[in-house]
């Protein structure tokens, strides 16, 4: 076995990325404090050709040196917008026929492994603040909730880790499980 060289990875140019068919997933980040978490989510979004990221509330926006450290240029490829009010973003996404799902531990949440993708649907995933999670008002406005099962003592994952897990799972189900 040999590690591949960067030249062997078939990387897209920024222009190729922008013209590529996107995975029908939108990420909504609400009140994310850590600039490194924001940058990491951008990098995950780039890896899986995610359609767009909405940065809401106090979530910082590019260009930002600290976001760039972890995004490694993904802020140049992934489409994004900033909005003050996450509730407005959620409602607009629902009006555009996206299925909006909070990633949160709530009553009646569907465990990630049990969540079934519906073909030809667009999904918007709402991730909340590192301390308080997705705001209750946002949870109530969403179409449903997905919970990542956890077996340890913390039952708390870093927001960028949660985004990576959920995006990978939905991407895999969209591309290979149907």
Image: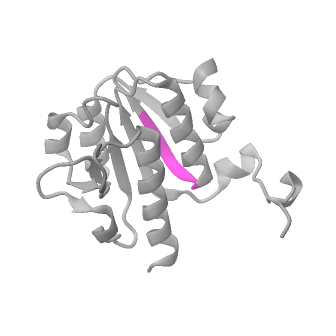
Residue 27 percent across, percent down from the top left? 42, 44
Q: Quadrant of residue 22?
A: bottom right
How many numbered marks are there? 0
Among the 4 quarters of the image, the one containing residue 129: top left
Q: Is residue 67 magenta?
A: no
Which quadrant does the C terminus fall into? Answer: bottom left
Task: Residue at 38%, 73% (x, y): give it.
Answer: 119
The location of residue 42, given as percent across then percent down, is 55, 39
Q: Residue at x 46, y 31 (%)?
A: 81
Q: Is residue 52 magenta?
A: yes
* Range shown magenta: 48-54
Residue 139 image point, x, y percent: 18, 43
User: Is residue 89 placed above or below 68 in the rendered structure?
Assistant: below
Of 78 and 68, nearer the camera is 68
45 relative position to 167: left or right: right
Q: Main secondary structure of the magenta part?
A: strand
Q: Quadrant of the N terminus?
A: bottom right
Residue drawn at 28 percent across, 32 percent down:
86
Examine the rendering and report whether any part of residue 63 can be seen: no
**Residue at x 51% of width, y 76% of height:** 176
Q: How are the residues colored?
A: one colour
Task: Give residue 7's quadrant in the image.
Answer: bottom right
């Amino acid at each position: 076995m040999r590690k591949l060289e960067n030249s062997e990875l078939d990387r897209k140019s920024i222009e190729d990325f922008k013209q590529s068919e996107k995975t029908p997933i939108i990420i909504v980040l609400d009140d994310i404090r850590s600039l490194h978490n924001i940058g990491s989510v951008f990098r995950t979004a780039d890896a899986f050709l995610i359609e767009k990221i909405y940065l809401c509330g106090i979530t910082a926006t590019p260009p930002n040196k600290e976001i760039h450290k972890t995004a490694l240029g993904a802020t140049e490829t992934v489409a994004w917008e900033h909005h003050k009010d996450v509730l407005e973003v959620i409602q607009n996404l629902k009006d555009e026929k996206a299925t909006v799902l909070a990633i949160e531990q709530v009553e009646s949440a569907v465990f990630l492994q049990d969540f079934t993708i519906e073909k030809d649907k667009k999904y918007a995933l709402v991730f909340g603040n590192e301390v308080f999670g997705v705001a209750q008002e946002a949870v109530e406005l969403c179409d449903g909730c997905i919970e990542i099962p956890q077996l340890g003592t913390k039952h708390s994952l870093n927001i960028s880790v949660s985004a990576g897990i959920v995006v990978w799972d939905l991407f895999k189900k969209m591309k290979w499980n149907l």
